[in-house]
Image: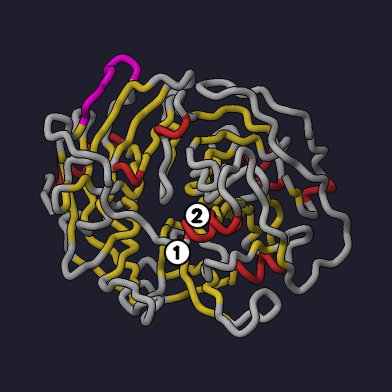
Amino acid sequence: MTLLRPLALVAALSLAACQTTGAAPETEPTASPAPGPSAAPAATAAPASMPAGAVLSPDEVARLTALGYVDVSEDAVDEEKMGVVLRDPERSAAGYRLFTNAHLCSTQIVDPDGKVVHAWSYTPCFRWDNAVLLPDGDLLVVGRDGKRTAESRWTEGHHLARFSWDGKLRWLRRIKAHHDAQLTPEGNISVLTAEERLLPELRENKPLQVDNLTIVSPDDGSTLEEASLYELLRDAPGFAFEVRRANRDLIHSNSIDWMRRPELAAKHPLYTLGNVLVCMRHQDSIAMIDWRNKKVVWTWGRGELSGPHDAQVLDNGHVLLFDNGVARKWSRVLELDPLTGKIVWQYQAEDSPTFFTLTRGSNQRLANGNTLIADSDSGYAFEVTPDGTKVWEFLNPNLWEGKRGAIVRMRQLDGALVERLLAARGGANG
């Protein structure tokens, strides 16, 4: 773990090995002391690191991560097993779940038995990269209507769109959006965007794709504020970029989580209201950003993570994240105490290689203490108890050319909100 000033002044970090619970053996995360007050270099490149348990070389990992995302599963489809294939009503969470079919440009809400109660879709469209249900019932979509090619690179088809509950397009903003969009604590919309830049300090003569965190208006998607994640990380003491020869996508950020819990903010400055946690697949790291002062205050993951996704802070202050395990060739879900650097819980399959998604992946801690997980590339989602027992399983019934559609993310929704929307506006098929 790397803890950056000023947090180093207020937290004494425990670097002891942790005891994990659940379906995984003991693990001892790597850690490093907090950096001193010396100024950070303009930009540095780190030697390619080998995460714990790696079986692939850094060059092989770079080649895999450059392949792009999977839209359909290569697993054999059993037409007898579609939708919810396991449900323990006593131990699984009740309520509604939302998931997005990237290849169909559609998002669906299902009940605990897998019945679709509401859906959205849109054409013309190439892919929906993510979708988020807003508190008023609108759907916020990160999408694209053109396929990226070697010639076009970042196509102009990337966009951020807002749809009403009944599927009407409120607005669509042509912006190089990708992976995630979330409401800020102030009610604006934050979205990950990308641009190409020449960065000779990292790679001579060839541009790199770098990410920004962009704030837009919820009314029309117009840009209100923007900061370069490259510049924030460049200026972070103790952080050095990993530059992978086979991959021009430097950061590949993929999730946003804003700090909005006063009780955690009172506990530690890491959780200051308005800070934002970002997950970065190609840097094998997560980072907490002080958005008001535009600086990185904490990073973690080097030597432990491999291609991670979907980092989020829990009510207890721990971080839940999906560690794809690209270098290991098996995935896991981790719960990290960021103040000590300890992994306090993790889920992995008993036969580790049977749970592996090279791309995407999602996790969510539920109110009953269980964890909802999406094995995205397989089009498979499941809920596990704290001891790792599966109590709900779902196979995406949406097929494309006979193959099961990948699941971008699966999220448990506020049941009362969905019930109100269904009662007031009815359900619909998109």
Asked if residue 155 is positioned above or below residue 23 in the image, the reply reads below
Which residue is at a point 33% across and 42% down the rendered structure image?
Answer: 410
Q: Is residue 85 magenta?
A: yes
Task: Give the amino acid type for the residue marked by disc 1 in the picture.
Answer: Val
Q: Residues within 10 Å of mark 2 (few under 14, many from 20)?
A: many
**What residue is shown with label 1?**
191
Quarter of the figure with the N terminus: top right
Residue sitting nearer the eye, 302 or 56: 56
Contact between marks 2 and 1 (CB within 8 A): the answer is yes
**Percent position of residue 207, x then y:** 55, 80
Which residue is at a point 80% across and 67% down the rendered structure image?
Answer: 40
Q: What is the C-alpha distance between the residues marked 2 and 1?
A: 8 Å
Q: Is residue 402 magenta?
A: no
Q: Which residues are magenta?
A: 84-91
Which residue is at a point 72% across and 61% down the rendered structure image?
Answer: 46
Quarter of the figure with the C terminus: bottom left
Give me the disc on residue 256. 2
